[in-house]
Image (tube, rainbow, N blue to C red):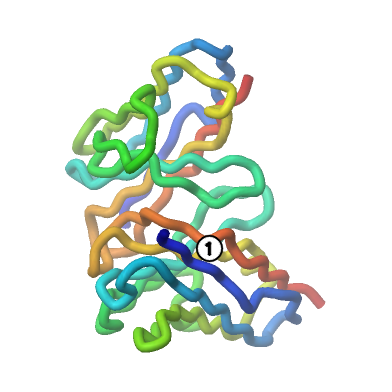
Amino acid sequence: QVQVVESGGGVVQPGRSLRLSCTASGFTFNNFGMHWVRQAPGKGLEWVAVISYDGSNKYYADSVKGRFTISRENSKNTLYLQMNSLRPDDTAVYYCAKGRYGGFTDYCDYWGLGSLVTVSS
Amino acid sequence: EIVMTQSPATLSVSPGDRASLSCRASQSVYSNLAWYQQKPGQPPRLLIYGASTRATGIPVRFSGSGSGTEFTLTISSMQSEDFAVYYCQQYNTRPPLAFGGGTKVEI
């Protein structure tokens, strides 16, 4: 069955970096766009970034543009989110989600359990 | 950038009641709208896409309607497992792919 599993979360100081990974299985990874969505404690969902099936198109929320980078390694069925210059308001559970199609204008049909990132000194 | 607005923020209903949740887009998204359900401590689950198509395994008591800027998620008869937070999301335009702020459906 379709599965996406996030890893790499933890506690990090403001200004530092962290990289999240998402390992996919149960579907042909290189056919589908992939998203990162986050949720701050007690808050709603915030879309963060999307990458198309081949990595040629990437888009970001304004709140993370210039600080976060989404990438993928199709040979390893893995999605990444490189997070630099982290701020306390980046504290959230970060979800990896599979897009329904290969592009970047899409909804998410499968979600991981999430990885908690806490930015605190 | 499209802004999605959900109302009400909280909806109090009883088991067996019909629940109607609203989602409004700041400009037309045609039928490119999805609904998700999220229970505490769980990731979101896709309920509806294309404004009205149920995702795989979603019970028929969930239905979506609307197009353009006004959308509704209806739960025809609330079951205990349906008490959760519901989010809409537009996917019509180039990202950012905005979510609404959510509607919490409580007993």
- Above or below residue A30? Residue B16 is above
**What x and y, as percent, mark residue B87?**
45, 41
Q: Which residue is at 44% across, 80% downward?
A: A78
Q: Quadrant of the C terminus of chain A?
A: bottom right
**What x and y, as percent, mark residue A71?**
41, 83
Element type at marker 1?
A: strand
Image side of residue A13 versus residue B20, left or right: right
Image side of residue B49 versus residue A37, left or right: left
Point out the residue furthest to the right here. A121
Q: Which residue is mark 1?
A: A95
Q: Decide if residue B18 is in sight here.
A: yes
**What x and y, as percent, mark residue A73?**
39, 87
Q: Which residue is at 38% across, 40% downward?
A: B47
- Above or below residue B50? Residue A85 is below
Chain holding disc 1: A
**What x and y, as percent, mark residue A40?**
63, 57
Q: Residues within 10 Å of mark 1 (few under 14, many from 20)?
A: many
